[in-house]
Protein backbone atom coordinates (compact mmCIF):
# COMPACT_ATOMS: atom_id res chain seq x y z
CA UNK A 1 0.00 0.00 0.00
CA UNK A 2 0.89 3.63 -0.13
CA UNK A 3 1.42 4.05 3.59
CA UNK A 4 1.83 2.18 6.85
CA UNK A 5 -1.41 0.51 7.82
CA UNK A 6 -2.32 -0.37 11.39
CA UNK A 7 -5.26 -2.35 12.64
CA UNK A 8 -7.48 -2.08 14.47
CA UNK A 9 -7.64 1.69 14.74
CA UNK A 10 -9.35 1.38 18.10
CA UNK A 11 -9.44 -1.49 20.56
CA UNK A 12 -11.24 -1.69 23.89
CA UNK A 13 -10.40 -4.71 25.99
CA UNK A 14 -11.00 -5.94 29.49
CA UNK A 15 -8.20 -6.05 32.01
CA UNK A 16 -6.44 -9.41 31.90
CA UNK A 17 -7.26 -10.19 28.28
CA UNK A 18 -4.63 -10.57 25.54
CA UNK A 19 -4.58 -8.26 22.52
CA UNK A 20 -2.83 -8.33 19.14
CA UNK A 21 -2.04 -5.18 17.19
CA UNK A 22 -1.08 -5.39 13.55
CA UNK A 23 1.22 -3.28 11.40
CA UNK A 24 1.52 -3.50 7.61
CA UNK A 25 4.64 -1.54 6.60
CA UNK A 26 5.31 0.05 3.24
CA UNK A 27 6.30 -2.61 0.74
CA UNK A 28 10.08 -2.95 0.53
CA UNK A 29 10.79 -1.21 3.82
CA UNK A 30 13.17 -3.35 5.83
CA UNK A 31 13.11 -1.39 9.10
CA UNK A 32 10.05 -1.44 11.36
CA UNK A 33 9.54 0.26 14.72
CA UNK A 34 6.87 0.05 17.38
CA UNK A 35 6.27 2.96 19.74
CA UNK A 36 3.58 3.77 22.25
CA UNK A 37 2.27 7.10 23.36
CA UNK A 38 0.25 7.56 26.50
CA UNK A 39 -2.16 10.48 26.73
CA UNK A 40 -0.26 13.75 26.74
CA UNK A 41 3.12 12.02 26.74
CA UNK A 42 5.96 11.65 24.26
CA UNK A 43 6.74 8.61 22.13
CA UNK A 44 8.17 5.61 23.96
CA UNK A 45 10.29 3.24 21.89
CA UNK A 46 9.26 -0.40 22.21
CA UNK A 47 10.96 -2.61 19.61
CA UNK A 48 12.81 -2.40 16.29
CA UNK A 49 13.14 -4.89 13.45
CA UNK A 50 15.76 -4.58 10.70
CA UNK A 51 15.71 -7.18 7.95
CA UNK A 52 16.66 -10.63 9.20
CA UNK A 53 18.64 -9.34 12.18
CA UNK A 54 17.60 -10.09 15.73
CA UNK A 55 15.13 -7.42 16.87
CA UNK A 56 16.08 -4.73 19.36
CA UNK A 57 13.67 -5.43 22.21
CA UNK A 58 15.26 -3.04 24.68
CA UNK A 59 12.18 -0.84 24.93
CA UNK A 60 9.61 -3.50 25.82
CA UNK A 61 8.30 -2.56 29.29
CA UNK A 62 7.64 -6.07 30.56
CA UNK A 63 7.55 -9.72 29.53
CA UNK A 64 3.84 -9.33 28.83
CA UNK A 65 4.84 -7.52 25.64
CA UNK A 66 6.16 -9.35 22.58
CA UNK A 67 6.36 -8.71 18.87
CA UNK A 68 7.12 -10.65 15.77
CA UNK A 69 7.62 -9.83 12.15
CA UNK A 70 6.80 -12.57 9.70
CA UNK A 71 8.57 -12.76 6.35
CA UNK A 72 10.15 -9.38 6.89
CA UNK A 73 6.83 -7.67 6.32
CA UNK A 74 3.78 -7.65 8.59
CA UNK A 75 4.41 -7.22 12.31
CA UNK A 76 2.22 -8.12 15.27
CA UNK A 77 2.59 -6.62 18.73
CA UNK A 78 1.05 -8.83 21.42
CA UNK A 79 0.19 -7.70 24.92
CA UNK A 80 -0.73 -10.48 27.33
CA UNK A 81 -2.83 -10.03 30.46
CA UNK A 82 -3.47 -6.38 29.70
CA UNK A 83 -3.40 -3.83 32.50
CA UNK A 84 -4.98 -0.40 32.65
CA UNK A 85 -1.55 1.25 32.35
CA UNK A 86 -1.21 -0.37 28.92
CA UNK A 87 -3.84 2.05 27.62
CA UNK A 88 -2.12 4.19 24.97
CA UNK A 89 -1.81 4.79 21.25
CA UNK A 90 0.51 2.21 19.71
CA UNK A 91 2.33 3.57 16.66
CA UNK A 92 4.20 1.65 14.00
CA UNK A 93 6.75 3.14 11.58
CA UNK A 94 8.69 1.69 8.66
CA UNK A 95 11.68 2.80 6.64
CA UNK A 96 14.22 1.83 4.06
CA UNK A 97 17.16 0.46 5.97
CA UNK A 98 19.27 3.52 6.56
CA UNK A 99 17.37 6.64 5.64
CA UNK A 100 15.78 8.62 8.43
CA UNK A 101 13.71 10.61 6.00
CA UNK A 102 12.01 7.39 4.95
CA UNK A 103 10.41 6.79 8.34
CA UNK A 104 6.67 6.77 7.74
CA UNK A 105 4.31 6.35 10.66
CA UNK A 106 0.93 4.73 10.67
CA UNK A 107 -2.09 6.34 12.29
CA UNK A 108 -1.79 4.11 15.33
CA UNK A 109 -4.02 1.81 17.34
CA UNK A 110 -5.73 3.39 20.33
CA UNK A 111 -5.87 0.73 23.03
CA UNK A 112 -8.15 1.21 26.00
CA UNK A 113 -8.04 -1.32 28.84
CA UNK A 114 -11.11 -1.18 31.06
CA UNK B 1 20.52 9.75 28.75
CA UNK B 2 18.85 12.25 26.44
CA UNK B 3 20.86 13.15 23.38
CA UNK B 4 18.91 16.35 22.70
CA UNK B 5 17.50 19.21 24.75
CA UNK B 6 14.55 21.28 23.56
CA UNK B 7 12.38 23.91 25.26
CA UNK B 8 9.08 22.36 26.31
CA UNK B 9 6.93 25.00 24.63
CA UNK B 10 7.02 28.03 22.35
CA UNK B 11 4.50 30.44 20.86
CA UNK B 12 4.67 32.08 17.45
CA UNK B 13 2.46 34.61 15.70
CA UNK B 14 0.79 33.49 12.50
CA UNK B 15 2.77 34.57 9.45
CA UNK B 16 5.99 35.07 11.39
CA UNK B 17 9.00 32.78 11.35
CA UNK B 18 9.12 30.08 14.01
CA UNK B 19 12.63 29.27 15.22
CA UNK B 20 12.85 26.08 17.23
CA UNK B 21 16.18 25.40 18.98
CA UNK B 22 17.76 22.08 19.83
CA UNK B 23 20.93 21.38 21.80
CA UNK B 24 22.88 18.22 21.04
CA UNK B 25 26.26 18.86 22.63
CA UNK B 26 27.29 15.18 22.68
CA UNK B 27 26.62 14.57 18.99
CA UNK B 28 29.24 12.39 17.32
CA UNK B 29 30.69 12.72 13.85
CA UNK B 30 28.46 10.23 12.08
CA UNK B 31 25.18 11.30 13.68
CA UNK B 32 22.56 13.22 11.73
CA UNK B 33 20.07 15.71 13.13
CA UNK B 34 16.46 14.89 12.26
CA UNK B 35 13.30 16.84 12.87
CA UNK B 36 9.80 15.37 13.03
CA UNK B 37 6.52 16.89 14.11
CA UNK B 38 3.35 15.44 15.52
CA UNK B 39 0.06 17.18 15.00
CA UNK B 40 -2.61 16.29 17.54
CA UNK B 41 -3.96 12.75 17.16
CA UNK B 42 -1.71 11.92 14.21
CA UNK B 43 1.51 9.92 13.83
CA UNK B 44 4.81 11.83 13.61
CA UNK B 45 5.70 13.37 10.26
CA UNK B 46 9.23 13.74 8.90
CA UNK B 47 10.30 17.37 8.29
CA UNK B 48 14.00 17.58 7.47
CA UNK B 49 17.43 16.23 8.37
CA UNK B 50 21.08 17.27 8.03
CA UNK B 51 24.64 16.36 8.94
CA UNK B 52 26.82 19.48 8.74
CA UNK B 53 25.42 21.80 6.11
CA UNK B 54 22.28 23.85 6.39
CA UNK B 55 19.33 22.29 4.63
CA UNK B 56 16.10 23.64 3.16
CA UNK B 57 13.04 21.97 1.73
CA UNK B 58 9.45 22.94 1.06
CA UNK B 59 8.54 22.64 4.72
CA UNK B 60 11.41 24.18 6.63
CA UNK B 61 15.07 25.13 6.94
CA UNK B 62 17.60 23.52 9.23
CA UNK B 63 20.53 25.54 10.52
CA UNK B 64 23.32 23.54 12.17
CA UNK B 65 26.08 25.36 14.04
CA UNK B 66 29.64 24.87 12.87
CA UNK B 67 30.53 22.81 15.95
CA UNK B 68 27.29 20.80 15.39
CA UNK B 69 26.38 21.09 19.06
CA UNK B 70 23.08 22.81 18.34
CA UNK B 71 20.62 23.40 15.54
CA UNK B 72 17.55 25.47 14.75
CA UNK B 73 14.50 24.46 12.77
CA UNK B 74 12.96 27.41 10.96
CA UNK B 75 9.38 27.52 9.70
CA UNK B 76 9.57 30.69 7.60
CA UNK B 77 5.89 31.68 7.65
CA UNK B 78 4.10 29.80 10.39
CA UNK B 79 0.42 28.99 9.93
CA UNK B 80 -2.16 27.79 12.43
CA UNK B 81 -1.75 24.29 10.95
CA UNK B 82 1.88 24.26 12.08
CA UNK B 83 0.74 23.97 15.70
CA UNK B 84 2.29 20.67 16.78
CA UNK B 85 4.96 19.03 18.92
CA UNK B 86 8.34 19.24 17.19
CA UNK B 87 10.94 16.57 17.89
CA UNK B 88 14.69 16.95 17.36
CA UNK B 89 16.47 13.60 17.10
CA UNK B 90 20.14 12.75 16.79
CA UNK B 91 20.90 9.40 15.22
CA UNK B 92 23.57 7.54 13.31
CA UNK B 93 21.65 4.83 11.54
CA UNK B 94 18.52 3.31 12.93
CA UNK B 95 18.43 4.20 16.61
CA UNK B 96 15.55 6.69 16.44
CA UNK B 97 14.49 7.66 19.95
CA UNK B 98 12.13 10.57 20.57
CA UNK B 99 12.46 13.03 23.44
CA UNK B 100 9.72 15.23 24.82
CA UNK B 101 9.93 17.75 21.98
CA UNK B 102 8.77 21.37 21.82
CA UNK B 103 5.07 22.15 21.73
CA UNK B 104 4.74 24.99 19.22
CA UNK B 105 1.54 27.00 19.32
CA UNK B 106 0.90 29.33 16.40
CA UNK B 107 -1.45 32.10 17.40
CA UNK B 108 -3.59 34.29 15.12
Image: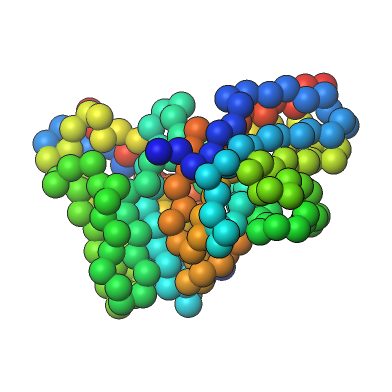
Which residue does the image show at 78% across and 25% down from the upper left? B12
Which residue is more in the foreground, A68 or B21? B21
Q: Which of B27 and B10 is in front in this view?
A: B27
Q: Which residue is drawn at 87% across and 30% down?
A: B16
Which quadrant of the figure has residue A5?
A: bottom left
Residue B52 % position (x, y)? 70, 57
Q: In the displayed structure, would residue B97 be above or below residue A73?
A: above
Q: Residue pushed farthest front?
A: B67
Give the x, y percent position of residue B62: 74, 49
Q: Does residue A52 appear left or right of residue A18 in this picture?
A: right
The one nearer the camera, A106 or B84, is: B84
Residue at 48%, 77% in the rendered image: A28
Residue A83 placement (x, y as % from top left): 18, 32
The answer to whether residue B21 shows anywhere in this view is yes
Where does the image place residue B75, in percent across and percent down from the top left? Answer: 79, 40
The quarter of the image holding the N terminus of chain B is top left
Amino acid sequence: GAGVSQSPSNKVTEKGKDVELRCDPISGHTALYWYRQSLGQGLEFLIYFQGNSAPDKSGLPSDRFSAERTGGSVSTLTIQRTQQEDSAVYLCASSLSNRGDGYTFGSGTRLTVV
Amino acid sequence: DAKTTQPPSMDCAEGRAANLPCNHSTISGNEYVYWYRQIHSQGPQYIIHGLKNNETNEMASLIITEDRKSSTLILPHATLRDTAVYYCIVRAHNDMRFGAGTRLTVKP
